Image (cartoon, rainbow, N blue to C red):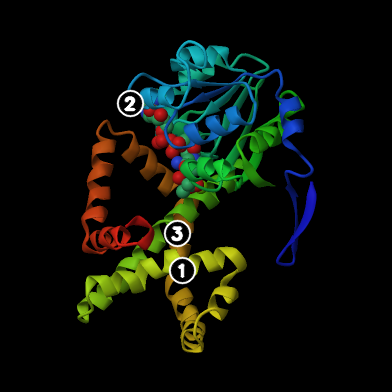
Amino acid sequence: MATINFGGVEEQVVTREEFPLEKAREVLANETIAVIGYGVQGPGQSLNMRDNGFNVIVGQRKGKTYDKAVADGWVPGETLFEIEEALEKGTIICFLLSDAAQIELWPTVKAALKPGKSLYFSHGFGVTYKEKTGIVPPADVDVFLVAPKGSGTSLRRLFVEGKGLNSSFAIYQDASGNARTKAIAMGIGVGSGYLFETDFYKEVTSDLTGERGTLMGAIQGIFAAQYEVLRANGHSPSEAFNETVEELTQSLMPLVAENGMDWMYANCSTTAQRGALDWWKPFRDATKPVFEQLYNSVKTQEQAEISITRNSQPDYREKLEVELAELRESEMWQAGKAVRSLRPERS
Ligand SMILES: NC(=O)C1=CN([C@@H]2O[C@H](COP(=O)(O)OP(=O)(O)OC[C@H]3O[C@@H](n4cnc5c(N)ncnc54)[C@H](O)[C@@H]3O)[C@@H](O)[C@H]2O)C=CC1
Ligand SMILES: CC(=O)[C@](C)(O)C(=O)O
Ligand SMILES: [Mg+2]
Ligand SMILES: [Mg+2]
């Protein structure tokens, strides 16, 4: 573990320098890693591990995603199986179905968890909300998680570019005495940048907050609010979209990613800096009560309940698609589509 000072707080993290890929390969040399589910995290993690030289198989029910796995080079009967068969062959079971689907498949997974096997998650959800999910692992298996802090799509793209996403890891149950080393080796194997340690409860609580908050929910809400105000005051869609989204994603966020908020500010006009410095606190104060409400709703398990009930309905995919289409077809994102088509690199 390396001790790193995060803004005045010292934390222990695992880096690729101290836990190199060769070490991860050694730790997992005798394991068959079965990735169950080939949705978003499944492809990212399994392909990265395969390219990193691990012994990986995929378990996926037949259908469109199974065909995608074949197209990605997984070979039926050799490295690609029906879920039950992959569960049988795997020694580390990566449970990468959607959190709601994990409930339905749990009895099958549990039956395959022979003593000595490991159960791997990428979210603390199933185990933390065990009263709702029924996911209670047998005592004689290791249970741990590695949660990449980003989409499986980015996990794969960054890996291909020689970069990586950071991940958290956590141990829920250490039956073998070696769970921690295995978890870290998996974290390195899936292509993480650095790994920070957490527990299942903290992982799911922060993750549900983040995705409902600044990462996905709040950001769309703030975009929509500003766009609507600009449009109501006679600005064109082109102007409103550029001043709300395009400039942020194309110009300013890359600067924040590179060197922090003050660096982005420093690369803007003094006029902009004056305004931004005056306005960020009112925005913080206006939204903080909503974030507190959100955190509380996660803590009371209301968010877990909603997620399970809504995503367990047989027609949940169709219903999600209707809501996604509503976003896609809104004027703001239709304007965005036109703006994207005009990016110079695309013409
Ligand atoms: N999407 C992401 O990038 C991230 C996901 N995670 C976590 O990783 C885990 C996997 O999430 P995703 O990749 O988003 O999952 P997903 O929603 O893409 O679904 C994964 C797979 O589940 C299969 N599936 C769905 N219902 C099924 C059922 N009843 N029986 C059998 N298979 C079924 C689908 O065919 C699909 O291959 C979750 O715990 C999630 O919270 C963590 C970090 C980011
Ligand atoms: C991509 C990610 O880490 C999220 C937003 O938490 C998720 O997809 O659940
Ligand atoms: Mg999440
Ligand atoms: Mg997340």
The residue pinned by badge 3 equals 213
Mark nearest the camera among 2 and 3 is: 2
Q: Is residue 180 left or right of residue 100?
A: right
Distance between the alpha carbons at the discs numbered 3 and 1: 22 Å
Q: Position of residue 165 (x, y in %)?
A: 58, 47
Amino acid type for the residue under numbered disc 1: Ser
Quadrant containing the C terminus is bottom left
Amino acid type for the residue under numbered disc 2: Lys
Q: Is residue 196 left or right of residue 242?
A: right
The residue pinned by badge 1 equals 251
Residue 327 drawn above or below residue 168: below
Whether residue 271 appears in this view of the structure is: yes
The residue pinned by badge 2 equals 64
The residue nearer to you, when weighing 290 against 122, is 122
Mark toward the start of the polypeptide (1 vs 2): 2
- Say few, some or many: other residues with alpha carbon within 10 Å of mark 2 (under 14 / 14 to 19 / 20 or more): few
Amino acid type for the residue under numbered disc 3: Gly
- Residue at image x 62%, y 45%? 168
Residue 190, quarter of picture: top right
- Say few, some or many: other residues with alpha carbon within 10 Å of mark 1 (under 14 / 14 to 19 / 20 or more): few
Q: Secondary structure at mark 3?
A: loop
Mark toward the start of the polypeptide (3 vs 1): 3
Q: Secondary structure at mark 2?
A: helix
Q: Secondary structure at mark 1?
A: helix
Distance between the alpha carbons at the discs numbered 2 and 3: 32 Å
The residue nearer to you, when weighing 236 against 308, is 236
The residue nearer to you, when weighing 6 against 240, is 240
Q: Position of residue 160 (x, y in %)?
A: 55, 41
Q: Position of residue 97 (x, y in %)?
A: 45, 30
Distance between the alpha carbons at the discs numbered 1 and 2: 37 Å
